[in-house]
Image (cartoon, rainbow, N blue to C red):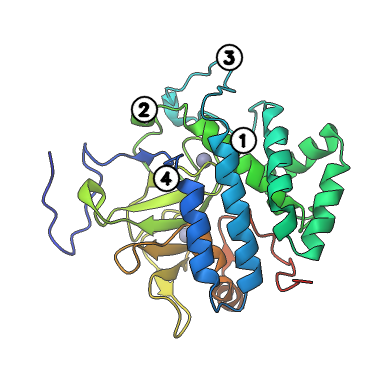
Amino acid sequence: MSSIIQPGAIVPPSQEAPFVRLADRKHVFRRRAERLLDLADGHPLEPFLMFLGALARAQQDALDSLEHSNPVSPRPDTSGAGGAAVFPVQGWTRAPLWRDLLGSILDSVESAAPAATRQAIDRLRSMDDGELEDMAQRILDGDNEALDPAAAPLVASALQVYWTHLAGHADPGHLGEKRFSKVCPVCGSAPVSSMVRVGGVEQKLRYLHCSLCESDWHLERLTCSNCESTTSLQFMGIEGGSEAVKAEACGECRSYLKILYMDRDLDVDPVADDIATLALDLLMAEEGYERSGPNLLFVPGEEVADTN
Ligand SMILES: [Zn+2]
Ligand SMILES: [Zn+2]
């Protein structure tokens, strides 16, 4: 079955368009790695983006290694009843497995890492389980104050793999309630960005993308993803920058989140393109807007140009 969508029409999700889309676990991080390498070419942050490409490849390898393992025990209620997150970042007991994933990611990226990151890898290897768990919780709590900005993205990358694996055990047909949600119906995290999709029943539909578990959930276009206001949204970009990435800024709550357009660039990635447009974040800060969701691979204030 297919539906005919008129050009320019903004359609609510029909029965066929899912409210929640789970990650394509075979390809999600591999595609991100390829995108990061493409974006890196000639970019002012080229070395940083190249390293993140290596990190994304390591994430895919780590996720692939879990193909036949089931860390979900006992199996939780995956019905999403009442709109509650199925694998909530607050309250979910993380399996020690995520620390094994971190170890394999650190081994994979060490040779590609700039000096400051190699030192961060050493610091992480010297931490005991309790210290790593504390750091993980601070990341999941969005508590950036006391975070080690070079080490936190590495820990976050392992948490992303772990939660993407968990999310694969959810039943997308029963996730969330089809109404406004500013957090992910699978894990309760804030979105990293949103994306207007192309193709099939999702044509021109906008989905928010989870900063942690790589799930998408639907939100009507022209609606603030933070406060649901529809009255004073502006779309801002960098002059001469990509037309496929804009900041959707809300005059009501003074927040913004980037919105990506697949019809302008089919290869946009919700994490990679967000990082590659840090200049837009600087502009939005100057304009007095605050970002409503994190990119876990970048702690604001981190020195990204250090490639020694
Ligand atoms: Zn999520
Ligand atoms: Zn708002």
Q: Quadrant of the N terminus?
A: top left
- At 55% from the left and 22% from the top, the residue drawn is 70
Residue 65 badge: none
In front: label 3 or label 2: 3
Mark closer to the chain start, 4 or 1: 1
- At 45% from the left and 40% from the top, the residue drawn is 26
Q: Give the image location of residue 236, x and y in percent.
A: 44, 75
Disc 1: which residue: 89
Comparing 265 with 186, the one in front is: 265
Is the shortest distance between ligand 1 and the CB of mark 1 under 8 Å? yes
Task: Give, as a three-letter code, the residue at label 3.
Answer: Pro
Q: Kindly report the distance in space between the C-alpha atoms of the residues bearing marks 2 and 1.
A: 19 Å
Question: How many numbered marks are there?
Answer: 4
Comparing 27 with 148, the one in front is: 27
Q: Is residue 242 left or right of residue 303?
A: left
Disc 4: which residue: 216
Disc 3: which residue: 74
Callout 3: helix, strand or loop?
loop
Q: Give the image location of residue 197, x and y in percent.
A: 31, 56
Mark closer to the chain start, 3 or 1: 3
Marks 4 and 1 close (CB-CB < 8 Å): no
- At 38% from the left and 51% from the top, the residue drawn is 207
Mark closer to the chain start, 3 or 2: 3
Task: Give, as a three-letter code, the residue at label 1.
Answer: Val
**Image vertical order of residue 173 relative to residue 255, above or below:** above
Mark closer to the chain start, 3 or 4: 3
Task: Give, as a three-letter code, the residue at label 2.
Answer: His
